Image (cartoon, rainbow, N blue to C red):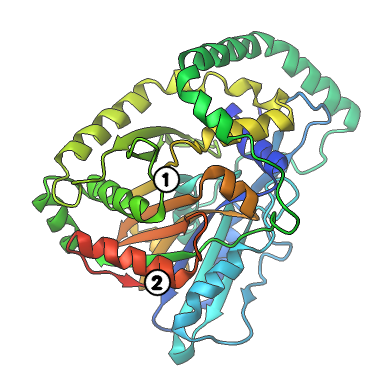
Amino acid sequence: MDNRLAYLDQVPLLGLRALGYVTLIQATWIYDGAVDIEGLRRFQRNLGDGLLGRRIERSPLPFARDRWVFDRGPKDPDHLDIAATPRPRADVGGWIDERGNLTIDPEFGPAWHLGILPLEENGTAVSLVVSHGVSDAVGVCLAIADAAEGRRRDLGYPPPGARTLTRAALEDARGTILEIPALARALAATARFARRQRQDLAPSIAAASPSPPAAGHDQPVVLPALSAYLDVAEWDARAGSLGGTSNSLLAGFASRLGVRIGRVGDDGVVTLSFPVSERTEDDTRANALVRARVRVDPAHVAHDLGEIRAKIKQALAEATENSAELLAPLPIASITPKWVARKAASLAQGANERPVVCSNLGDIGPAVNRPDGTDAAYLSMRLFESGITKSRLDVMGGQLNLGCGRVRGKIFITVSGYPVGESNSKSELRELTLRTFAEFGLTAEID
């Protein structure tokens, strides 16, 4: 089989090595009572036999595509990482942050880990953290559902180190030679994109050239984050009353929160970035998605979602239609130097536009809410960067990421935000989030 990474899957690893921080997906379940430990042990074993049962093995050639190898995850799949001391329900958010900052690496492993926290008064929290280099959010949901229902996928990957160094070098050199036409097309596509976008890129290029950080300034930052839960019926009713849909209400909420956190462009517009899944049945790519960008005037969205709804519909259609063009430059990822990757990351993160990421999973299958075989009371999923530094956040002009999904009559919205020059406390983020919900006439339960 061809176990080489898809072109898009080279990008997260390139970013990790160039920038020094890893993009993660974290799913958290909260049970009102005790969990089935044997069910969670079975769940952990099954995760290693699906889309998450792999990691990346680097090519010995610096210009060749890397490969997937089999890796089940925990060295002892029957050992569960259970916190020794129960905590109050109010401390779950802190524990979630702690789990998110444990070591994750899609190359050296572990590429994912599972943790359990007993709560006082008999509740339980469960956390699964996965490298985005191994799977996107839709893939993580599929892996969770497979593991919860006992489905195993044999991806056919070889074990680590199955190839000798000589064999690996020869095979990868041959593969790279065969890809020269694709590399030439990718370079041409990159040049065409740069020419078309040079006016838009100029401000971002300037913003992507920071001065060296002061001593002690370039420290890893744990971004404030929270999870909000709302009743689906209330959410949908409010969306309909404003002339919108669930997706456009999320976009409106994100744009108003973006105003409060300083994610507004120089022209007064908020830029929303929506991941659009292209995952098909039996798709083994780690990242099967493109991104749609929507520019929103945030002034009136709390009263009328009609315009933003139309813009989202158009942007999603264009992203799907133009996916081939958007992905055309990706074959050069394996030959891109780290310094170029650092510059490109700053451009992609759009310091000038200050984008707000909105990852909407929509309706989530019931199996995703049953890691131990029974329904959790709450499920949430978030996207964040572990190990990101203050200087990088300053270059980006801050950050705001939102995640959203619907399950068991609830909708969760996760928020992770960092406004430059502010106190950046979780309590402050909570207050800004509550005020934004209130602006839309909504009430939320927030962890």
Q: Which one is nearer the viewer's eye here, 298 or 53?
A: 298
Residue 82: x and y, percent? 61, 77
Residue 328: x and y, percent? 53, 18
Instruction: Return the residue at label 1.
Output: 357
Residue 117 lies left or right of residue 56; in this view the side is: left
Q: CA distance from mark 2 to mark 1?
A: 31 Å
- Indicate which disc residue 237 carries: none
Above or below residue 105? Residue 190 is above
Q: Residues within 10 Å of mark 1 (few under 14, many from 20)?
A: many
Q: Disc 2 residue type?
A: Thr
Residue at (74%, 62%) from the top-left corner?
75
Count all numbered tags in the image, as a single digit.
Answer: 2
Residue 429: x and y, percent? 41, 65
Residue 389: x and y, percent? 65, 53
Q: Disc 1 residue type?
A: Val
Above or below residue 245? Residue 59 is above
Q: Which is nearer the N-term, disc 2 or disc 1?
A: 1
The residue sitting at the right extreme is 166
Residue 95 lies left or right of residue 240; in this view the side is: right
**Residue 65 lies in quadrant:** top right
Instruction: Return the residue at label 2.
Output: 374
